[in-house]
Amino acid sequence: DNTVTVSAIDRTKVKINDREGVDRNLALISMSIGDNYAYSTNNNDLKFFTDVEFSANGGIPGIAGFTIFAYGLFLLTFWNSQPGSEALVLIAAGIISFFSVNPYLLQLVDWRIFMIEEAEALLHSSKSMNKLLKTNLTVLLILMISSTQFGIMQAVIDTLSGVDMYFAILFDNASLMLAPICLGLYTNLSLQAVQILGAFPFLMMIFFSTTFSPGAGVDGLKNLRYLFSRYYLFCMTPSVDVMMEGCPESNNLLYLILSSLLIVFIFLVVIGGMALHRKLQKKKNSEFKRQSMMTMEYAELQVELFGEKALKKLKHIGSNVDLKSLENSVRSKSMEDDGTSSDEPVTVSDETV
């Protein structure tokens, strides 16, 4: 077996057995072409991930404790809620769910930074795999807290039941929590930027969903309510559904689910557009570099820096400048430096540099 040692200070160099100062990328290439090289996710990787996430420092136990405490108080203070107060019960429970998950969402930025540093230290660690595991765990946490919300609501009021209501609550909660997941894990934004942008869905829901003041708003602008899952949720809520303006006559749950995923769709479009822009910019830069290497100015600069050797390189890259004049320039400069004359011309061979 071989031993690879990575420094905690300089991640660009590694130690392989007794050989020190080996370039990290060279080490990766060397190991990847070994006869027995085969790396794939195994149970040890998953066990390490779960052990860390469910430890006292992982955040899950703290989230669970706070959720139990908050919904315990909710159960005591909203017990025996009367029909007609469904909207208030729904809003209160949704706020508790949001603040139960929010501490976990806020630490995603720090987790991403630390995980990338560790992935650089562990040569085989996959950043994409770790992000996917973290995403799945966060979504599972949202599912569990939303299920808790639905169950507690059944205990305090009996008019918010049914499978459709369960999925409506689940996806309404997700619509407010998916943005911090996308921004925290899959961008390089700072914690402050993620907090500001991640809160936009919640803020825009208050302004444009019309659920806090049904039917209110400037004509035209209030049509934006159809973009928010909370609007469709209130169209399903007893006592307030008759106050909501323009509720769909059918497929209400489908519209709710689609609107809850709008943030994810926008995020994917933006990320895809940025990736395409980087690809085109890289291609443009490569073309600019290639064209720059064909100019006389580049050729003269090469001759200035490297003398006769530059002529061989220019011929090798297929430069279309007047190499003959450059040969004469090199010859003249050489004669001036040596203080002598020579009838032997400087020739450009076909030897590659």
Image: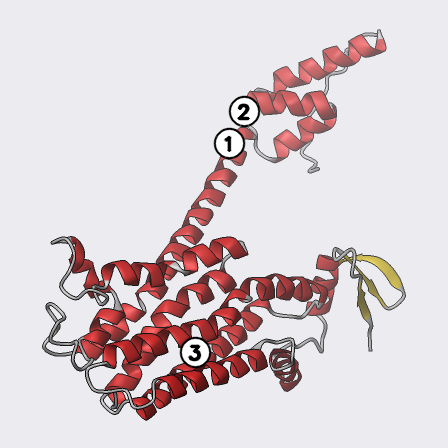
**Circles 2 and 1: CB distance less than 8 Å?**
yes
Decide which of 159, 273 is in the foreground and name it: 159
Q: Amino acid at mark 1?
A: Gln
Q: Nearer the viewer, residue 146 or 239?
A: 239
Where residue 93 appears, x then y in whole percent? 36, 79
Q: Is residue 337 above or below residue 187?
A: above
Q: Position of residue 219 (x, y in %)?
A: 11, 54
Figure quadrant of the N terminus:
bottom right
Give the image quarter of residue 353. top right
Q: Is any atom of residue 188 visible in this view?
A: no
Give the spatial CA distance, label 1 vs label 3.
53 Å
Viewer-nearest of labels 1 and 3?
Answer: 3
User: Residue 255 placed where, x, y %?
Assistant: 21, 73
Pointer 2 with pointer 3, Cβ within 8 A = no
**What kind of element bears circle 3?**
helix
Q: Which residue is mark 3?
A: 142
What's the distance in space between the residues labelled 2 and 1, CA to CA? Answer: 7 Å
Q: Residues within 10 Å of mark 1 (few under 14, many from 20)?
A: few
Residue picked out by circle 1: 291
